[in-house]
Every structure is written in C-alpha cells, then in structure tokens.
Amino acid sequence: MREFDYVTASTSLLTPRTTSLLTAIHEAKGRHTVHAAIHPDFLKTLVAVARIQSTDASNRIEGIATSDRRLNALVEEKTTPRNRDEEEIAGYRDVLATIHDSHDYIPPTPNVILQLHRDLFRHTPLTFGGRFKDGDNVIIERDANGERKVRFAPPSALITPELVEGICSAYSEAIRDGNTDPLLAVAMFVFDFTCIHPFNDGNGRMSRLLTLLLLYRNGYDVGKYISIEHLIERSKNTYYEALAASTVGWNDGTNDYAPFVNYLLGVILAAYRDLDERMDTLSATTVDRHVAGHVAENAAGGRGARKATKEERIASLFDRELAPLSKADILARMPDISATTVERALKTLQDDGRIEKIGAGRATRYVARR
C-alpha cells in the first residue's frame, strides 16, 4: 500500500523555482500583517466578498450553480435551498464558514475530514455524507473533442481509510518537524487527498476546503480576503494539467509532486498579489489626498488632511490600470463601494473625458484616456 513521507519528499522540491515562490509568499505574508493593522475595516469587507466568490467558484468547477441573486441570498442565509444545486451550495457555505471562524480548533484528522464532508451534504437528502466511499471510483476528464476518458484510477475503497490516516499522519509529522516549509506540506497533503479520492462525491470541493483549512492553520489567511477557489476556477485548465502531471506514478510512489505544488504556490502568491494591489490602491488614494489636503490646509493655516472620497479612489484606479475595467471589476477591487456609487463615478469620469466606454451590454468596459 502507498506510504507517505512529506519530510523526505519536501527536500526534493526545493528547486530554484519552488524556493522563489516560497520566498515571495513569505514576504507577501509579512506585508499583509501591515495591511491588516492599517485597514481592518476594508479587510472585513473583502471577507464578505471572498466568501461569495469562493462558494460560487468551487461549486461551479463541479458544474453546480445558481443565479447571482440566489447565490448571494444563500451565502447571506437570507433564503433556503430550492433544488439540489442550491442544497450543495448551502453545504459549502456552512463548511467554509466553519473553517473561516474556527480553523484553529479543526485539526486535519480522518474523523474531522469525515465531519466536514458530512456538513457539506447536510442540506441534501443524500446518505453518503460523512462516510468514505463504498465502491471504487475513477477520475474522468473530457478531451478537446468532448470525449470522456479515465484520467486516473484512485485506490480501492477498501484501503481508503488507511490512506487518509496515512496522509494525515505524514502532514502532522512534517509540521512537527520544523524544517519542512508548511506550504509544501499543505500542497502535498491536498494533492494526495485528491488522488485518494476518498468520497463518493464532493472530493474536489473538499480538497479546496482542506486547502484553506491548512493554510489558515499555518498563518496564511489570504484566502479569507481573496478567493483562492476563484483563482483556481480561472486557471482550471492549468489546475487539471498540474494534477495530471503529478499523478503519473502515484500508485507506486514514484510520482513528482512538483507540478501541482508549484501550481498551488502560484495560486497562493497570486492571491497575495491581488490583495497587495487592492490595499495599495486604497492606500495610494488616501495618501494622495492627505498630501493635497496638507498643502491646502497649510496654505490656509490649518493642519491635517482628509481621506480620499470613494469617487476619487475609483478615478485613481483608472490612473493605475492599463487594461479596460468592467463595473464588476471595480466592485471586486473596491467591495466597500456600492454599485450606485460606481455607476455615478463612471458617468462623471466619462463626462469629464477621463475615461471612455468600450463595448456594450455584458461586454461593457471602461478605459482611461491617455
């Protein structure tokens, strides 16, 4: 039966590429600590947006979806599920909230994993929630022609409980070791969990929830503010390619973790950079107004300065961005600003000749005049 040793395996992963990714993430984590101290209220707003995006994206990867209006109502617990898709969305919402709020008290053990899986399906009439698979399964993919084919055959259901125990033990040993970077242990654990495919259904969603759980427990909480699931969905093809590359030789223990580890590290780094960008935009507009206000008030004999208005922050975003932006792009980057305010600012900026509108309908974008 397959055995797991993340302490030993991690040493072969320390290539220049992986090391540079780890270093960049560690540095970004330090910057985030500063951001959290300066703009706590803005971060709280990002949390609410990320929960909706995470619930939406992780389920859509599996073909589970509902309307935007219904999704928001479900995540905010303002309605109850109407169908099977919404039942599963509500389950993901619940598990995600548990992980966000109580990760320090949720160790990665087989029993905990079963409990999280049970809660994932708690709103459905399905009876397999909280139980390991009772039959062998396969991982299917579609080729360019839409044909279904087996990408990987996970191990037998008979040995699944032992394998899950094995990865939990290997992860715990790597964390206790002190010399293994926790990010490597997290990535290897998540990959092996995906290969074991321990449940009849919900394996993909559970892998993403466990990713967040382990990152949070190790102090990497960027997923609370920037949806990692959304970033995975946007790079879904690369995600599956990395899984496929690292799967080769898995059953006999000769697989290479590097493709998947580097993919996941890249996603985590992208999340931190996205957070940096949003915080930098907020800080830059505030600083700009502070400087202008300081000059004006000094001239009038006053002291101090005011913060940038929301409209000024939106204008500053266009000054900093080269690519066209949609209204949704602006709302995602500045979630503390209402849609009405964004629409008003866009109209003002157009009237002033600072931006121009391109496209129409759902394809509408705005770009700065340069």
Image: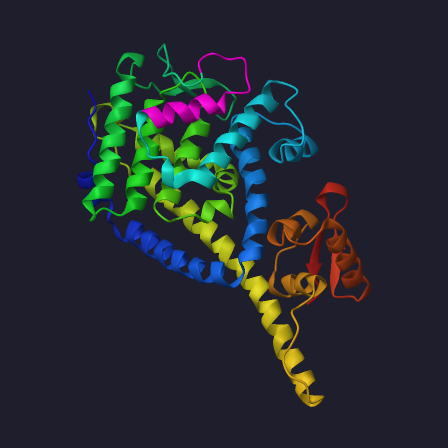
* Residue pictured at 60% horizontal, 34% vertical: 75
Which quarter of the rendering shows the C terminus?
A: bottom right
Residue 127 forms part of the magenta stretch: yes
Residue extending farthest right = 351
Q: Number of numbered discs present?
A: 0
Instruction: Please give left or right for residue 290 compared with residue 183 in the image.
Output: right
The answer to whether 210 is drawn above or below residue 224 in the figure is above
Q: Is residue 98 left or right of residue 250?
A: right
Say if 131 sits above or below 255 in the image: above
Horizontal and vertical percent position of residue 9: 20, 39
Give percent across and percent down for residue 5: 19, 34
Question: Would residue 17 appear left or right of 226 to someone viewing this image?
Answer: left
Classify residue 295 by image quadrant.
bottom right
Colour convention of the picture: rainbow
Q: Position of residue 329 (x, y in %)?
A: 64, 50
The residue under the point 33% across, 33% down is: 108
Q: Is residue 98 visible?
A: yes
56 over 63 or under it: above or below: below
Residue farthest to the top?
A: 135
Q: Is residue 63 visible?
A: no
Q: Residue at x 29, y 45 (%)?
A: 182
In-front residue for pair 112/126: 112
Quick one: 155 or 255, which is closer to the camera? 155
Q: Which residues are magenta?
A: 111-128
